[in-house]
Amino acid sequence: MIRRTAAPIALLAASMALPGCIIVADSGPHHYDRSDYNRVSGHEMDNLIASNREARLGMDKATVLGLYPDNLTTLKGSGLDSGVEVEAWRVSAVTRDGDLSFTRWLYFYDGRLVELRDDRIDWDNESRLASWRAH
């Protein structure tokens, strides 16, 4: 079972009251507006794509996030699953001319990369959480 909340106090209270559940703070609706993406040069985009190829499941969060420029990464959701930290990060950029955009969603469970995708996923999925717990 997943609980979504935007308030950190509600997150803490809910996590204490509902052992075995994941509590997710989600930053908003799923959409494809790229206006908040940082603009990069074509060369920077090439470097970003090359760095992305190095990300592997099981890598620790610091190593994975270190592959990407800090200004292109954003924590988009976090929560607890039976006291274990779960985070969703988005890496995003668009070339200055707007011809090419890049989006990668990184999901961490207990500090390890458990999923990386081009699109955002719904966290309200017990089978996915079970899969992440198994990593």
Image (cartoon, rainbow, N blue to C red):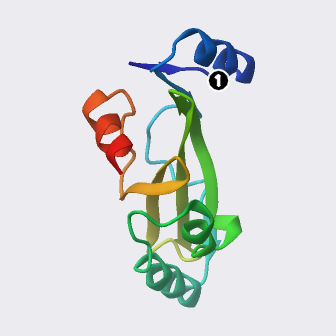
Left or right: 42, with 104 as reference point = right
Identified at 63% across, 53% down, the residue is: 74
Relative depth, front residue between 45 and 109: 109
Q: Which amino acid lies under the numbered mark 1 shown in the image of this protein?
A: Ala
Q: Is residue 77 above or below residue 112?
A: above
Residue 56 at x, y percent in the picture: 39, 70
Residue matched to label 1: 6
- Dot 1 lies on which element? loop
In the rendered view of the protein, which quadrant contains the N terminus? top left
Relative depth, front residue between 94 and 19: 19
Identified at 55% across, 52% down, the residue is: 89
Residue 84 is drawn in which quadrant? top right
Mark 1 neighbour class, 10 Å CA radius: few under 14, some 14 to 19, many 20 or more: some
Report how many numbered discs are placed on residues in the image. 1
Left or right: 110, with 118 as reference point = right
Q: Is residue 81 above or below residue 108?
A: above
Identified at 44% across, 61% down, the residue is: 104
The residue positioned farthest toward the top in the image shown: 17
Identified at 39% across, 33% down, the residue is: 123
Residue 54 at x, y percent in the picture: 44, 80
Residue 39 at x, y percent in the picture: 63, 71
Residue 116 is drawn in which quadrant? bottom left
Relative depth, front residue between 33 and 87: 87
The residue positioned farthest toward the right in the image shown: 9
